[in-house]
Amino acid sequence: MANCPKCGYKLKLRDIKPECPECGVNVVYYKIEDRLREDADKAELEQAKFQPKMDRLKASVFGSPLAIIRLVLMILLIVSLLLPLAKIRTDLPFGTSDITVNLVAIYKFFGNLDFELLFKLFNSKVLGNDFVFFAVAFISLLLTAVVMILNLAFMVMSFGKKGIVRNVSLNAIGIVLISVSAICFHFCSKGFETHIPGLYEGSVSWGIVIVILLFVALIVVNLLFKILKIEVKYTYVDDLFLPYEQRKAYREEQERLKNESDEVKAAKALKEAEERLKAAHEQVNREKKKKK
């Protein structure tokens, strides 16, 4: 059982009343204001420690027009994987098939892919190199999608240590990966067209260009954060690190200074109004004298 917070009496199971049987103090409400104040102090201290992180997160995501533009570009970059990245045409004895390569087609292909058969095809004397190019193109495209997701995740840490450098590096890696994917797919298609003529045609589509341009746009936007020297607007929380009594005194002083400032402004405005009224009376008197 607990002890009485005032006299230290060890409470027993039979002590069901809220008052301590030894000193009579209410155990529940004894110094409750002090305890509440301590809890409030702890909560405000945690807020003071966490607030800078929140300020950096807000500045990274929507703290400026440039941040909003970056967010939109990142979303468009992920959506761009739904565009036609490549086109494949197969002309088999049982029919012709036209395939548009994008994120949906990649997902379906990956779900039905026989990896064991693919590894065996790597050893083919005729089509082995072509399937290696195909595998590299496929893996590079998947890694490009991973970079896009990481780019979006790391955006919230843009104002952290080396945040802009990390963002630029990720987008540069994305350009390299999507370029490698396009080049390998080109060589893969040329190989298939050479070794099985008339049965396969493949070409890189305009969606690849859009993806690369969006990566380049993101690099430019991230560099503009440095060039324009956009900084975080931190919320003032220094007073929350002070002990309760000092914080209370500080806030009372701030309120007093504010009231004094308002009184000074009011007195100044009143004085200016009196001067204008006096000047108006003098003007009226001068006009009366001229009439006489």
Image (cartoon, grey):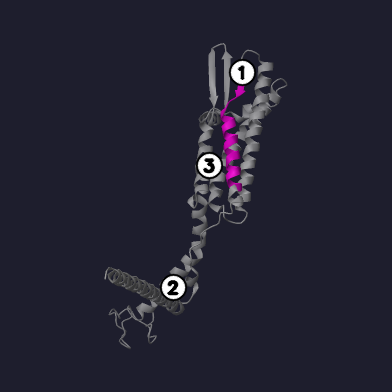
Q: Is residue 119 visible?
A: no
Residue at horizontal 71%, vertical 25%? 129
Residue 122's place in the image compared with 278, above or below, is above
The residue labelled by disc 1 is 201
Please provide percent x and percent y for residue 152: 53, 45
Label 3 crowd bin: few (<14), some (14–19), many (20+), radius 10 Å: many
Which image quarter: residue 202? top right
Tell me the kind of residue under disc 1. Glu
191, above or below 246, in the image? above
Residue 93 on the magenta span: no
Residue, disc 3: 74
Answer yes or no: do the residues labelled 3 and 2 have beta carbons within 8 Å?
no
For the C terminus, which image quadrant?
A: bottom left
Amino acid type of the residue tagged 2 in the rendering: Asp
In the visual, does 258 lie left or right of 25?
Answer: right
Q: Residue at x 27, y 68 (%)?
A: 291
Q: Which residues are magenta?
A: 201-223
Of the numbered discs 3 and 2, the one sitting upstream in the chain is: 2
Taking depth in this image into account, of 74 and 289 the one nearest to the observer is: 289
**Residue under label 2:** 41
